[in-house]
Image (cartoon, rainbow, N blue to C red):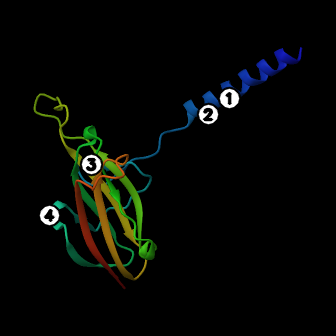
């Protein structure tokens, strides 16, 4: 009697959980540019876009502005771009979202295995100050190996 009640109860809970999972809509994708999307709800249009060629520059960016960093990446190699946080200035810039955009297909619609895509990080300047934005390209499990690449942007958040 007690055992059949427990089995019935567990089956009911599993059934309800499955219904909730199946009926919950997926998160909305916000449009960032004509051919890329960031997988985060209500992502604002970035006011500043920085790429690999902007490595090492120092820029003035108004508080409240959003910026998008786009760097070449290849997720099939195990390498990822990762923010190297500066705890002293972490309240100046806030990460809104991170995404990996797959490489574009060729004319025949196929994507070459191992082709590079694009890493994207959307950030917002929260308050006045100087923030050294540093991204490292590495394999997260290789803790005793130096990063393959790094990318730096000095941000002077101004009013």
Question: Is 75 displayed left or right of 21 in the figure?
Answer: left
Q: Which residue is mark 2?
A: 20
Quarter of the view holding residue 105: top left
The residue pinned by badge 3 equals 36
Find numbered disc 4 in the image and state the secondary structure of the residue it sits on.
helix
Which element type, helix, strand or loop, lies under badge 3?
Answer: loop
Q: Earlier in the sequence, mark 2 or mark 4?
A: 2
Residue in the picture at 74% in, 24% down: 10
Report if the CB atoms under discs 2 and 3 are less than 8 Å apart: no
Cα distance, mark 3 to mark 4? 20 Å
Q: Can you say whether 40 is above or below 84 in the image?
A: above
> Viewer-proximal residue, 87 or 66?
87
What residue would you read off at disc 1?
16
Helix, strand, or loop for circle 1? helix
Give the residue at mark 4. 53
Instruction: Answer whether labels 2 and 4 touch (C-beta < 8 Å).
Output: no
- The residue sitting at 72% across, 21% down in the picture is 11
Cα distance between the residues tagged 2 and 1:
6 Å
């Amino acid at each position: 009697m007690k055992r059949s009640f427990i089995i019935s109860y567990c089956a009911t809970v599993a059934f309800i959980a499955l219904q909730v999972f199946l009926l919950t809509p997926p998160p909305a994708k916000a449009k960032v540019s004509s051919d890329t999307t960031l997988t985060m709800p209500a992502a604002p249009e970035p006011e500043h876009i920085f790429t690999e060629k902007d490595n090492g520059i120092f820029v003035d960016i108004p508080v409240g502005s959003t910026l998008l960093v786009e760097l070449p990446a290849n997720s099939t190699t195990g390498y990822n771009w990762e923010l190297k946080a500066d705890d002293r200035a972490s309240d100046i810039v806030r990460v809104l979202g991170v995404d990996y955009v797959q490489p574009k297909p060729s004319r025949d619609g196929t994507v070459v295995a191992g082709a590079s895509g694009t890493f994207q990080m959307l950030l917002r300047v929260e308050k006045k100050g100087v923030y050294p934005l540093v991204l490292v390209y590495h394999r997260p499990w290789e803790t005793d190996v130096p990063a393959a690449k790094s990318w730096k942007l000095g941000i002077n958040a101004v009013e």
